[in-house]
Amino acid sequence: MNLIARLARAAARVIRDVADAPAVARQLRTLRAQAETPRPTLERVPAPLTAEDIADELPEVADIEEAARIYEQARQDANAAARAKRKAEKVLKRTPDGVYGSVTIERFESSRKTVDLDAVRALFAAHGLGDVPMRPCSPSLVITLTEQATETSAPTLAAA
C-alpha cells in the first residue's frame, strides 16, 4: 500500500471522528449526568460555645464582620498561594539535583512520619479486630458574607 492511500485512509478516519464528535460528546454528558450521585448534605454541628456561654465577652457585630472579611481574604490568599506552589513544584519535582544558576536543588529524607494504613488494616484483619477505628475531623468553619446586614445578625440572648 502506498503512502498516499494510507494518508487518505487516515484522513477519512479523522474526518469521520470529527464528524461524530458532537454526538459522542452528547452521549458522554448524558452518561455522566446519569452516573453522578448527589453530593451528601453536610451535617451541621453545634458551635463549641453558645452566645449564652460568653454573653459578657461577645464581640460587637462590626468586629465579627471585620474578622469574617479578614478570614475570607486570608482563605483566598492561601488558595492562590497553594496554586502557585503546586505550579512551581511541578517544574522543580521534574528537575534533577544540581546547581542551576543561583539555585541548588537537593532532596533529603523527610523526618515526617505518617501511619501506613494498609499495614494497620492488615494487622487488624490478621488479629480479627474488625475495621480500623476512625474519628471525625474537627468541623469546618463556613463563613458567608452578604452585601447588607440583616436584622438578626447578632444572636439574641434570653433574659435569665
Image (tube, grey):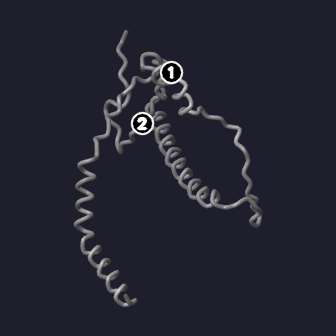
Whether the residues at callouts 1 and 2 have beta carbons within 8 Å, the answer is: no
> How many numbered discs, if any?
2
Which three-letter amino acid code belongs to the residue tagged 2? Val
**Percent x, y for residue 35?**
27, 47
Going by the picture, which residue comes out furthest to the front?
1
The residue to which callout 1 is attached is: 57
**Percent x, y for residue 122?**
53, 28
Which three-letter amino acid code belongs to the residue tagged 1? Glu
**Percent x, y for residue 154?**
38, 28
For this view, does 99 lie left or right of residue 141?
right
- Measured in 3D between alpha carbons, the distance from the residue under mark 1 to the one under mark 2, in whole angstroms, is 22 Å
Rendered position, 26 above or below 121: below
Please tell me which of labels 1 and 2 falls first in the chain.
Answer: 1
| Nearer to me, 29 or 86 | 29
Image quarter hosting the N terminus: bottom left
**Percent x, y for residue 31?**
25, 53
Rendered position, 142 above or below 14: above
Instruction: Give the crowd class for mark 1: few <14, some 14-19, many >=20 residues within 10 Å.
Output: few
For this view, does 21 lie left or right of residue 85?
left
Instruction: Give the crowd class for mark 2: few <14, some 14-19, many >=20 residues within 10 Å.
Output: few
| Nearer to me, 97 or 47 | 97
The residue to which callout 2 is attached is: 142
Q: For the residue labelled by badge 1, is the local secondary structure a helix, a strand or a loop?
A: loop
Q: Residue at x 28, y 46 (%)?
A: 36
